[in-house]
Image (spheres, grey):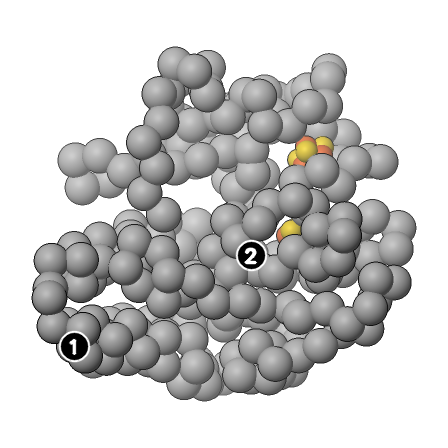
Amino acid sequence: MKRNIDMNEVSDGKLYTANDMVKMGCNDCSGCSDCCTGMGSSILLDPYDIYQMTKNLNRSFDQLMSCNLVGEEGTLRVIGLDIVDGLILPHLNMAGVRERCTFLNEEGRCSIHGFRPGFCRLFPLGRIYENGTFHYFHQVYECKKSHRTKVKVNKWLGIPNLKKYEQFVLDWHDFLETAGAEVRGSSDENAVKQTGLSLLYVFYRKPYDFQRDFYEQFYEKLEELI
Ligand code: SF4
Ligand code: SF4
């Protein structure tokens, strides 16, 4: 999602790589679930997230889309869709009057911690894309915990084979940039709709083969659409 932000206002002014230490450790979030509530539709899900969620929850994307969990505040829908920069993309739903993520359990802990989406792993880091690469930055005012400790970015993310994942993040970002610019510049409503639906189908709705590597399949899907 494109955001115009003033780095001096939101961050400590530094850019980080996966090997850098950042003062963001929050004692395992004990007693806090602030960033799992009230996030609106901002927790976007990428194809890696959907691969992990469909595999570990044993449900297809379409099942997750129509999956209604019954929680303390009634019936909760897990995933929603939104138009983001001209493209149809899925996001985690916040539900109920307290706008809680549907995966937040009664103890205020993430019930899918081991395969939580990349956005959740990243927080309170953000990514800034420049000159064909990206860096991490620390959104210093987002997490209110005090006495934060230094943590290495790659440990914080906890994603296996991080180099491959970071390349995927970059390639996915570039693909969305190109596809988004195309649809925003088009006056052909049918073509715009078709592009959005094809992207949604190929990267999200079309099942992944869990016996195979995610990245191999992602690049095959990318070939289908470019
Ligand atoms: S706001 Fe900070 S301490 Fe609270 S859940 Fe999020 S990362 Fe953890
Ligand atoms: S998936 Fe987990 S970490 Fe992410 S918002 Fe929901 S409860 Fe929080």
How far apart are labels 1 and 2 at the CA level?
Answer: 30 Å
* Residue drawn at 79 percent across, 36 percent down: 32
* Residue drawn at 50 percent across, 72 percent down: 51
Q: Is residue 66 left or right of residue 47?
A: right
Q: Where's residue 204, x and y in %?
A: 42, 75
Residue 212 shows in this picture: yes
Q: In the rendered structure, which disc, 1 or 2, sits on the residue that comes first in sequence?
A: 2
Q: Residues within 10 Å of mark 2 (few under 14, many from 20)?
A: many
Q: Which residue is mark 2?
A: 117
Q: Where's residue 187, x and y in %?
A: 11, 66
* Residue drawn at 88 percent across, 55 percent down: 106
| In the depicted structure, whether residue 36 falls above or below residue 61 | above
SS of the residue at dot 2? loop
SS of the residue at dot 1? helix
Q: Nearer the viewer, residue 208 or 64?
A: 64
Q: Nearer the viewer, residue 81 or 210?
A: 81
Q: Quadrant of ligand 1?
A: top right
Ligand 2 within 8 Å of disc 2? The answer is: yes
- How many marks overall? 2
Q: Where's residue 92, x and y in %?
A: 58, 60
**Quadrant assignment for the C terminus:** bottom left
| In the depicted structure, whether residue 209 falls above or below residue 149 | below
Which dot, 1 or 2, sits closer to the camera? 1
Residue 158 shows in this picture: no
Q: Residue 180 lies in what quarter of the image?
A: bottom left
Q: Is residue 157 left or right of residue 196?
A: right
Q: Are marks 1 and 2 in contact (CB under 8 Å)?
A: no
Looking at the picture, which amino acid does disc 2 mark? Pro
Q: Which residue is mark 1?
A: 191
Looking at the picture, which amino acid does disc 1 mark? Ala
